[in-house]
Amino acid sequence: MTAVSVERVNGTPVASPEPRFDPVALAEAEAIRTRAAAEAEAARIEAEGKAEAQKIKAVEDARKQKLLNDKAEDRAREEQAARDARIAESNRKREEADRARQDAIRDAEEKKAAAQAQEAEVAEAEDKWRGYARGFYIVCAIVALPVQVAAFYDPKALWLMAAPLMLEGGAWVVLKGAAAAVAAHRPQWHYRLIAWLLAFIAAGINLWHGLNAFDPATAIATAFASIAGPGVWDLHEHGRIRKRDGVLTRRERKAAEKAAKAEANQKATEEAQRAAEKEAAKKAAEETAKLLAETRAKKFPKVWDHALSLAADLGETAVTEAIWKRAKLDVDGALPGESAEVFRMRNAAEMRVEAARLKKPVSTLSKNTNAQRVPHLPPGSGRGSKTGPRVRGVRRSGDAPKFSPVARKQARIERTETSQNDRPNDN
């Protein structure tokens, strides 16, 4: 029961209930406190979980960052190592290039020094040879002159004793003229011819007078001396002329002939090889052309017969590619590689691919697109009347021209092929 208390309102006594505790309200309040405590606990647990997750995340981030830093350090060390390796390699190559350049310079200097030494040796040998030849000429003149002077001795004509000096000295003067001609790159053969003529005259005088006035040994020795002196000097000049003109020695000529012969043999071998390759290529091309002709005649008999007729008509001995192309156009109405069958097969394949892409049967594609629609007529909005007045936008029977029998036959063939392709495989 509820106790009633009396209160006065504006001087009038009013009864008011006395407050008491309600169990339902207390239960609801307890439930609210419990739910609040649970929510607070859940919030605390969630906060602790988030804090733990953040801590774990921070640790994981730190670990990942450490890994990234380690990788960056490793990458930096690798890059530095690679950079050091490149620098070392560059230094090594530069040092090798410097060594090679120094070796080349040293080899060039050594070759130059060797060439200079050889030139000096050759020049020294030439000077010695020149001096020896001159000295030998003088000795031979001294040996040959007494017999010649004795041959020209005449107490009544002492002046004739100058003739030997004229012969020996004339030969020497003419040979010096030949040397001057050689140095000036002028003809020198006539100088040498005159010197040999004077030498043989002096030798003949020594031989004749030696045999008459002295013994055969004296005659032969003095005659040989008259020829040997100018001969040795002319031999020296002959070598100088050959060196000036670049005349090859016998060994050099043999080596040049051997090299030329080897080169000629190599050229002949290469030409024979090229000829054999050319013949083999020609034979292969002929066989390929023959096989192609046989294949075309077997696969396309009508086109081949027409191509043969065209070739004969155009004056060709064989069916060329141009003639085959023209024959293919004349017979099949298409270029090589194309025909009505190819077009039909391609169209059917494209329809099958389109049906597979749209996940529809092939037969439904023709319902979506009317291949026989006349493009120049407006689409019909109603059937209209055959006898009533024409209405704009309404087609009637007979407005569109009829398709040719060939087109109708082609459409029928395509429908048949399409229906056959749409049938499921029994296997």
Image (tube, grey):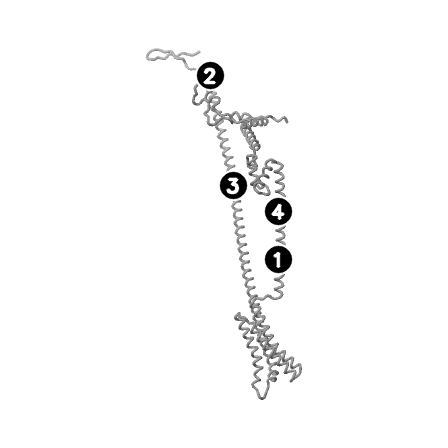
Mark 4 vs mark 3: which is more N-terminal? 3
Badge 4 crowding class, 10 Å Cα cut-off, few under 14, some 14 to 19, many 20 or more, is few
**Label 4 with label 2: CB-CB less than 8 Å:** no
Residue occupying image coordinates x 63% and y 59%:
261
Q: Are marks 3 and 2 in contact (CB under 8 Å)?
A: no
Q: Residues under labels 4 and 3: Cα distance?
A: 68 Å
Against 352, residue 282 (above or below) is below
Residue 107: image quadrant is: bottom right
Check the picture and name the quadrant holding the N terminus: top left
Evaluate whether residue 135 shows in this view.
no
* Lower position in the chain sequence, tag 4 or tag 2: 2
Q: Amino acid at mark 1?
A: Ala
Q: CA distance from mark 3 to mark 1?
A: 72 Å
Element under disc 4: helix
The residue identified by callout 4 is 282
**Residue to which mark 3 is pinned:** 68
* C-beta proximity under 8 Å, tags 2 and 1: no
Looking at marks 2 and 1 on the same chain, the residue that comes earlier in the sequence is marked by 2
Residue 182 in the image: above or below residue 341 = below
Nearer mark to the viewer, of 4 and 1: 4
Could you say which disc has been placed on residue 24 in the image? 2
Res. 101 in view? yes
Residue at horizontal 42%, vertical 15%? 19
Q: Is residue 19 left or right of residue 59?
A: left
Mark positioned earlier in the residue sequence (4 or 1): 1
Which image quadrant is residue 425 in?
Answer: top right
Front label number (4 vs 3): 4
Furthest toward the bottom, the residue is 156
Query: Where is the C terminus found, in terms of image quarters?
Result: top right
- Identify the disc placed on residue 264: 1
Q: Amino acid at mark 2?
A: Val
